[in-house]
Image (cartoon, helix red, strand yellow):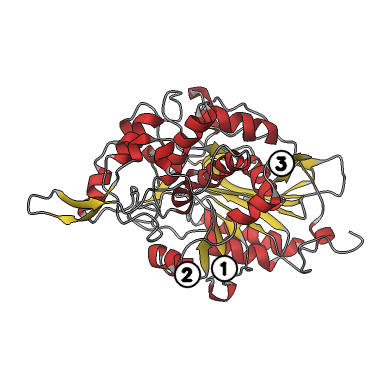
């Protein structure tokens, strides 16, 4: 799918420091991201504190924490704030804009999950279905229990079949590309996933490798969403990228979202940077996301999408609205409630990701705050989201009515590990709340 170019007209823009902060006017005919716009005070937010958040990230760009940022904030379905700061391409002197496209990596996963749940709602798929019912290559899976003296894996049969729910919750035992230490991790790294011709070849390769553990045993971040992309193809009879375009992107108005772009459109995509040994920024080839200008490169359900802040805000607001946007129902609110309930063992995210995941759970394709009292940033129970490797972020907060997106493009594997945006973004975002509530205050 080729991403169409378009520009959104911003009203009431004012230059602040090195960035642009857009204060939304109180005019119903004016919209951003397909949503009405309002002043922060009209929805119980502090304009000064939102500006302080923008200034914070403008300073971060000036000190080379990242090249630049795009931020968008909505409350009660109205866009109240957006900010662009720093550069999309430092060497070319091209500033960040509201139209800048980003490789959103794992922010693809919630989109893939929404597509799966559409099929579940239609009775074409069930959460407890064995994956092998649709992808026979996943029959008779084996689990690694160790390695012999020759370095070959010792395996045992899986005690039960991998289910669709196992894939959606990352409890299948399937591996990924982040284990660079164990012998099994090295097997997965050397499997050549970047060289497959289509999703069928991809899933056959995944199914040929030993599982990390028995299905359902624990949480382990994985290629599960990429496998789900192939499940969607088989069940729907459509190519995965075409299904997403027809069922989500086109009706949602996400005209800048897809898996592939033309070579001419590369100039609209934010450059990926990482830190060098001196803490400066150096360009980075984002090979992990595949060749986005090659229309034949398989679309990755776990991390292949390119999008903009305005486009992703439409998807995030649809989820925040309980599955509806712009007068169209994409998912039932009951389904969204199912997706945003924790389905894994307490403490699993913290055990896997570390202390930054305290108080977090994982449902179907999204993580959520299950214990805000343990979260390492300002949060409310029930907030749900899922970020991307290159530090793209979004959050929907049912208890406050806030939906927000932050886009940047930083590789965490540089010589100097960058400070990730999640904690500062969440804390400063929710610090802007001056009236609490999930619905608009009376008279607003």
Between circles 2 and 3, the one closer to the viewer is 2
Q: Earlier in the sequence, mark 2 or mark 3?
A: 3
Which residue is painted at 44% across and 64% down in the image? 349
Q: Is residue 91 visible?
A: no
Label 1 – label 3 distance at C-alpha: 29 Å
Which residue is painted at 51% across and 61% down in the image? 343
139 or 98, which lies in front?
139
Q: Earlier in the sequence, mark 2 or mark 1?
A: 2
Quarter of the image with the N terminus in it: top right
Q: Earlier in the sequence, mark 1 or mark 3?
A: 3
- Residue assigned mark 3: 33
* Label 2 residue SS: loop
Residue 206 image offset from top left, x and y in percent: 32, 40
In this picture, residue 270 sits left or right of residue 77: left
Q: Are marks 2 and 3 in contact (CB under 8 Å)?
A: no
8 or 92, which lies in front?
8
Q: Is residue 316 visible?
A: yes
Q: Are marks 2 and 1 in contact (CB under 8 Å)?
A: yes
In this picture, residue 288 sits left or right of residue 311: left
Q: Which mark is residue 346?
A: 2
Residue 428 image offset from top left, x and y in percent: 63, 65
* Label 3 residue SS: loop
Tell me: residue 160, above or below residue 89: below
| Residue at the extreme right of the image, as rendered | 443
- Residue assigned mark 1: 370
Q: Quadrant of residue 200?
A: top left
Q: Are marks 1 and 3 in contact (CB under 8 Å)?
A: no
Label 2 – label 3 distance at C-alpha: 36 Å
Which residue is painted at 68% across and 43% down in the image? 314
* Label 1 residue SS: loop
């Amino acid at each position: 799918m080729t991403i169409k170019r378009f520009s959104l007209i911003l009203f009431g823009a004012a230059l602040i420091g090195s960035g642009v902060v857009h204060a939304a006017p109180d005019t119903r005919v004016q919209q951003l991201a397909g949503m009405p716009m309002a002043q922060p005070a009209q929805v119980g937010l502090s304009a000064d504190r939102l500006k302080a958040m923008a200034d914070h990230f403008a300073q971060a760009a000036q000190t080379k924490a990242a090249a630049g940022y795009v931020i968008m904030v909505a409350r009660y379905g109205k866009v109240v704030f957006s900010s662009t700061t720093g550069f999309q391409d430092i060497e070319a002197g091209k500033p960040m804009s509201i139209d800048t496209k980003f490789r959103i990596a794992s922010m693809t996963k919630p989109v893939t999950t929404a597509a799966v749940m559409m099929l579940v709602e239609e009775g074409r798929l069930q959460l407890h279905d064995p994956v092998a019912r649709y992808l026979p290559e996943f029959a008779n899976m084996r689990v690694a229990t160790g390695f012999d003296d020759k370095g070959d894996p010792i395996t045992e049969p899986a005690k039960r079949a991998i289910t669709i729910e196992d894939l959606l919750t990352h409890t299948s035992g399937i591996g990924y590309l982040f284990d660079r230490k164990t012998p099994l991790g090295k097997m997965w790294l050397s499997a050549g996933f970047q060289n497959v011709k289509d999703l069928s070849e991809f899933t056959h390769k995944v199914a040929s490798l030993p599982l990390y553990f028995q299905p359902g045993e624990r949480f382990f971040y994985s290629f599960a969403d990429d496998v789900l992309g192939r499940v969607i193809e088989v069940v729907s009879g459509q190519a995965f990228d075409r299904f997403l375009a027809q069922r989500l992107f086109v009706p949602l108005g996400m005209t800048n979202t897809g898996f592939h772009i033309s070579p001419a459109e590369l100039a609209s995509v934010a450059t990926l940077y990482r830190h060098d040994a001196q803490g400066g920024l150096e360009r980075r080839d984002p090979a992990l996301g595949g060749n986005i200008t090659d229309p034949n490169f398989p679309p990755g359900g776990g991390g292949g999408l390119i999008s903009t802040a305005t486009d992703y805000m439409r998807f995030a607001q649809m989820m925040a609205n309980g599955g509806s946007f712009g007068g169209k129902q994409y998912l039932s609110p009951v389904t969204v409630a199912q997706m945003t309930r924790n389905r894994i063992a307490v403490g699993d995210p913290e055990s896997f990701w570390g202390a930054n995941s305290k108080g977090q759970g994982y449902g179907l394709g999204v993580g959520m705050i299950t214990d805000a009292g343990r979260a390492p940033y300002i949060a409310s129970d029930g907030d749900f989201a899922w970020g991307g490797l290159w530090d793209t972020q979004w959050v929907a907060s049912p208890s406050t009515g806030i939906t927000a997106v932050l886009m940047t493009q930083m590789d965490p594997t540089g010589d100097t590990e960058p400070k990730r945006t999640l904690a500062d973004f969440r804390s400063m975002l929710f610090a802007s709340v001056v009236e609490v509530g999930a619905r608009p205050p009376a008279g607003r």
